[in-house]
Amino acid sequence: MPAERQLPSPEAKELVELTATMCDRELAPIVAEYEAASRFPRKEFAVLGQAGLLSLPYPERFGGGEQPYEVYLQVLEEISYRWSAVAVGVSVHALSCYPLATFGTPEQQEEHLPRMLSGDLLGAYCLSEAHAGSDPAAMRVTATPTADGYLLNGTKAWVTHGGAADFYTVFARTSQDTRGGISCFLVDADTPNIRFHPPEKKMGLTASPTTQISFDDTPVPASRLVGEQGQGLSIALSALDSGRLGIAATAVGLAQRALDDAVAYAKEREAFGRAIIDHQGLGFLLADMAAAVESARATTLAAARRRDAGLQYGRAASIAKLVATDAAMKVTEDAVQVLGGAGYTKDFPVERYMREAKVMQIFEGTNQIQRLVISRHLARP
């Protein structure tokens, strides 16, 4: 059954309904084909961008939708319900725009944000490295100052949209200072001396390319420094608080879809003379799945409302990411169990949902890192 939503305005309700209709038309018919072929749906991102769905949380003056996160996340849910890889991509694009939208100069924002938010351009976020995933302060990619800018050197890892994006928000070391030695840059995809490695061979989200990116004396003009030199780590961590909410909503949408598919199957499949949903053992399993989805949604929206109210929400974002992605993993696994042997085949999409859910416990900070973040908040005076 569709999610029962409490939205803040009739306009928000119309936006969520429009998203569902558009995704049913543009995404649902091709998801299985594209995932099977590891084919990136670049045209579909442009369609979503033209509809304003890539820019919802950003200011109207730059072409954004100026929507509260409470609404934006429920739009992401609807996208993920049809195609999780696209919802992850929308969230990553929003994450890639965040540093410039929040820390950029007015001149930088006027020059770049309108095209970034219109759907003409697709973004990627370059923070992780092979040896520095959960510990970004250990990054080794460098940005060496020159007379007119910087030269980037080194390799970034796990870049969503790597090789397919039009711009990259890149974090690089500008000094050896542990916390103040990292800076943020906006880098165009056609900048000289960038090499995109072959996409990783992943178990899920196969339609979304994830690559390493190498820089070899890659020139970046001084005008592409976002924020102050040395401010990069605080920018990155601030952006991740918002990004974690996006992944939480994506996980909720995926879990809702797995639940709905499992319920539909359980109503039709019969055993011992009645639908299997009427057997208490299976009915209770579905009830637990429904409780997990509703709890994850409530936790995610509670964190979004804190953000919208201007309250501290870092701990709430980590809790939402932890709760929602763990729930998605459990619900998708149980959906496979509900379908039994059929669920273990590729004839039904629930096995794909389970593979897609796994990575949500890993990116934007593993769930072990979320527990560390939460515990550190609890330890504060």
Image: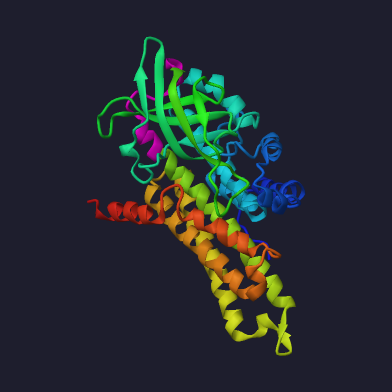
User: Percent from the top left, x then y, of residue 187?
Assistant: 50, 25
Q: Is residue 245 above or below residue 44?
A: below
Q: Is residue 61 visible?
A: no
User: Percent from the top left, x then y, of residue 79?
Assistant: 64, 50
Q: Is residue 234 magenta?
A: yes
Front residue of 378/167: it is 167
Q: Is residue 222 above or below residue 240?
A: above
- Left or right, residue 316 beside residue 35: left
Q: Is residue 192 magenta?
A: no
Residue at coordinates 35% horizontally, 56% vertically from top-left?
A: 371
Residue at coordinates 39% horizontally, 34% vertically from top-left?
A: 235
Q: Is residue 286 above or below residue 31?
A: below
Look at the image and give the residue range highlighted in magenta.
Answer: 221-237
Answer with the quarter of the image where residue 234 lies: top left
- Left or right, residue 284 beside residue 270: left
- Left or right, residue 311 beside residue 293: left
Answer with the quarter of the image where residue 180 lies: top left
Q: Residue furthest bottom?
A: 272
User: Percent from the top left, x then y, of residue 207?
Assistant: 63, 46
Q: Is residue 327 visible?
A: yes
Residue at coordinates 58% horizontally, 29% vertically from top-left?
A: 166
Answer with the quarter of the image where residue 144 lies: top left
